[in-house]
């Protein structure tokens, strides 16, 4: 592997990583690593990860990392940040961890304006357990728990977490949705999030991501699916308050 | 220095004297004053960290986060809160995080009964998905809420196991004189995450088994240093009474009247429910004709030790006086002892 093109904060001994071929996580973590390198904050970062595919990042980087439990990365990182406010607390989760089992904590962190950098990777399914329906799954989408397509009646439409958080977050918070189709935008969102954390406010970046394994898509179809996601989940900064 | 305070207040004073810096919690009777009093302390002192979380799950995990940074942190709860904290305790158990959890027991599910019980022993000792690698103290008075909270912080950081102090609603709400001794050498704390990647996810049974076995071995090795009991009355008495927490003290009072010359009964309590002072109990049980178990649960203490008594070939008649989620008064003890043939 040509490590010259890889972020310096990568832990080389854990590469090649364990994510599936074509997984969006690897692309996102690379942008996160590059941003942390560029800002020279790897000594300050405490990286917390949730359960789901995100857990495979437990030894991805050379900085302090704690893999937590499902839906609990936000609470742990709140404890980290409160105990040591000089640290940059990054909470990394999937859409199941953030929008289902851990939603209560995510909403309250936004509401209290806890100075954590929350990063949520949305691939519209529970990928680690084999592709079950999530709150982000679209009506009609086939998953292993919606084999004839998700029915919006009884199972919900699709949850727009950013819209939800923007209604409770403090004016000083930073909320943005980006997509793996645009890595530069991911980096700029990360920078804005770290700036916000520096000013002691909550930031949240949702990243629309691809999951070829569970979507059962090839490269072209994966990005086709992503385009559909970008239509339904607007890729934009979220205005706060009235 | 002596102060006239409640058991809940005593727990806070114990935490402060131990150098605790952070407390996360959620209101729940009968432990709520711990949250309230800590919040008042934090108002007066910028060094102290306080957050009233959205639920007990978050409180437990936030404690884990602060402890990872090397800050002494704790939470306090009861009943359904103790249930919700098990996931965080399992994380702490496996990652060897020295968290402190104060549990003031109440009865039944949800708001079943918010006064008192000894029904949270199983939860405190073996409540998580793991092997119960925890230290659990059972306090019986407001004084012990102070003393055992001091001891809990010391043991947690010294041995790196999550530590619980089990009290109950009567102890929490009761006001009495409490001697606020200072700990001799508060155990020094430091970051547990610096330079590390920590996890609770393993790629294979082999990998996890190897890791867990080390923790179990370490717990077993430390057990003799941690396990503690107390016994009053003659060691050669014909009958042994076993109880823990506040029930122990009710029986102690009753025996002053029932057995004033202290001839018939030896009274034994485990101070630590986990690790359990097995050896002490075996010695106390030796040669006894009768062994009484008094508890405000349906035998949670008895079930914790019955295998040990069997293993020690104790032939005594076992008499169980179980009153799940119900108090004992000294006269109840006298009635039971008189009635038990």
Image (cartoon, coloured by chain):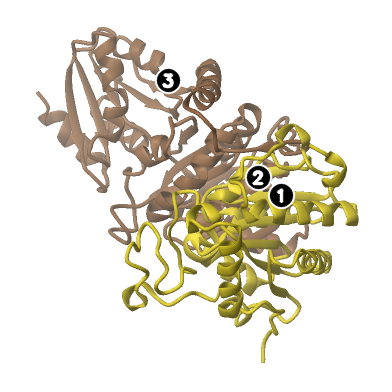
Chain colours: A yellow, B brown
Q: Residue B327: where, in percent of width, then height? A: 27, 47
Residue A39 tag number: none
Q: CA distance from mark 3 to mark 1?
A: 40 Å
**How would you rate the neighbour count of disc 1 (Cα within 10 Å): few for under 14, some for 14-19, many for 20 or more?**
many
Q: Which residue is mark 3?
A: B277
Question: Callout 2: residue from which chain?
Answer: A
Q: Which residue is mark 1?
A: A47
Q: CA distance from mark 2 to mark 3?
A: 42 Å
Report the residue at 47% width, 64% height from top: A100
Tell me which corner region of the image, top left, top right, bottom left or bottom right, holds residue A204.
bottom right
Tags 1 and 2 in contact by the CB under 8 Å rule? yes
Question: Callout 3: residue from which chain?
Answer: B
Q: Is residue B263 left or right of residue B50?
A: left
Q: Is residue B34 visible?
A: no
**Depicted B45 relative to depicted B75: above or below:** below
Disc 3 with disc 1 on a shared chain? no
**Depicted A54 relative to depicted B243: above or below:** below
């Amino acid at each position: 592997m040509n490590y010259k093109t890889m972020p310096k904060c990568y832990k080389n001994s854990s590469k090649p990583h364990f994510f599936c071929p074509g997984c969006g996580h690897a692309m996102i973590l690379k942008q996160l690593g590059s941003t942390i390198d560029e800002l020279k904050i790897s000594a300050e970062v405490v990286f917390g990860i949730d359960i789901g595919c995100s857990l495979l990042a437990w030894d991805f980087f050379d900085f302090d990392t704690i893999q937590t439990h499902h839906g609990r990365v936000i609470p742990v990182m709140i404890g980290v940040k409160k105990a040591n406010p000089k640290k940059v607390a990054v909470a990394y989760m999937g859409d199941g961890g953030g929008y289902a089992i851990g939603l209560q904590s995510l909403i309250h962190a936004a509401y209290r304006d806890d100075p954590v950098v929350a990063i949520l990777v949305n691939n519209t399914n529970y990928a680690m357990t084999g592709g079950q329906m999530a709150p982000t799954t679209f009506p009609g989408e086939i998953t292993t728990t919606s084999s004839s397509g998700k029915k919006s009646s009884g199972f919900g439409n699709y949850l727009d977490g950013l819209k939800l958080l923007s209604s409770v977050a403090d004016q000083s918070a930073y909320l943005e949705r980006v997509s793996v189709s645009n890595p530069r935008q991911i980096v700029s969102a990360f920078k804005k999030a770290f700036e916000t954390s520096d000013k002691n406010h909550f930031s949240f970046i949702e990243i629309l991501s691809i999951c070829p394994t569970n979507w059962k898509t090839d490269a072209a179809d994966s990005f086709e699916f992503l385009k559909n996601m970008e239509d339904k989940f607007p890729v934009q900064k979220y205005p706060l308050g009235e | 220095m002596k102060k006239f305070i409640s058991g809940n207040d005593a727990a806070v004073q114990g935490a402060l004297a131990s150098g605790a810096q952070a407390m996360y919690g959620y209101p729940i009777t009968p432990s709520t004053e711990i949250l309230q009093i800590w919040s008042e302390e934090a108002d007066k002192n910028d060094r102290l960290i306080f957050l009233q979380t959205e639920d007990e799950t978050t409180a437990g995990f936030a404690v884990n986060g602060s402890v990872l940074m090397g800050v002494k942190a704790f939470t306090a709860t009861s009943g359904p809160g103790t249930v919700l904290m098990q996931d965080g305790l399992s994380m702490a158990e496996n990652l060897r995080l020295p968290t402190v959890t104060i549990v003031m027991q109440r009865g039944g599910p949800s708001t079943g009964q918010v006064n008192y019980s000894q029904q949270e022993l199983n939860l405190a000792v073996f409540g998580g998905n793991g092997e119960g690698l925890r230290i659990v103290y059972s306090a019986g008075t407001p004084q012990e809420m102070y003393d055992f909270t001091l001891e809990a912080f010391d043991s947690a950081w010294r041995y790196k196991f999550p530590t619980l102090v089990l009290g109950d609603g009567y102890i929490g709400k009761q006001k009495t004189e409490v001697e606020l001794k200072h700990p001799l050498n508060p155990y020094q704390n430091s970051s547990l995450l610096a330079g590390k990647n920590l996890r609770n996810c393993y790629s294979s049974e082999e990998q996890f088994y190897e890791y867990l076995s080390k923790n179990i071995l370490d717990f077993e090795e430390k057990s003799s240093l941690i396990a503690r009991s107390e016994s009053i009355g003659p060691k050669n008495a014909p009958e042994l009474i076993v109880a823990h927490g506040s029930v122990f003290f009710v029986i102690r009072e009753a025996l002053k009247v029932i057995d004033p010359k202290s001839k018939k009964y030896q009274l034994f309590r485990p101070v630590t429910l986990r690790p359990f002072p097995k050896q002490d109990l075996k010695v106390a049980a030796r040669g006894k004709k009768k062994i009484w178990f008094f508890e405000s649960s349906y035998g949670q203490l008895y079930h914790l030790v019955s295998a040990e008594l069997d293993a020690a070939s104790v032939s005594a008649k076992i008499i169980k006086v179980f009153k799940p989620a119900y108090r004992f008064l000294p006269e109840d003890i006298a009635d039971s002892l008189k009635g038990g043939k």
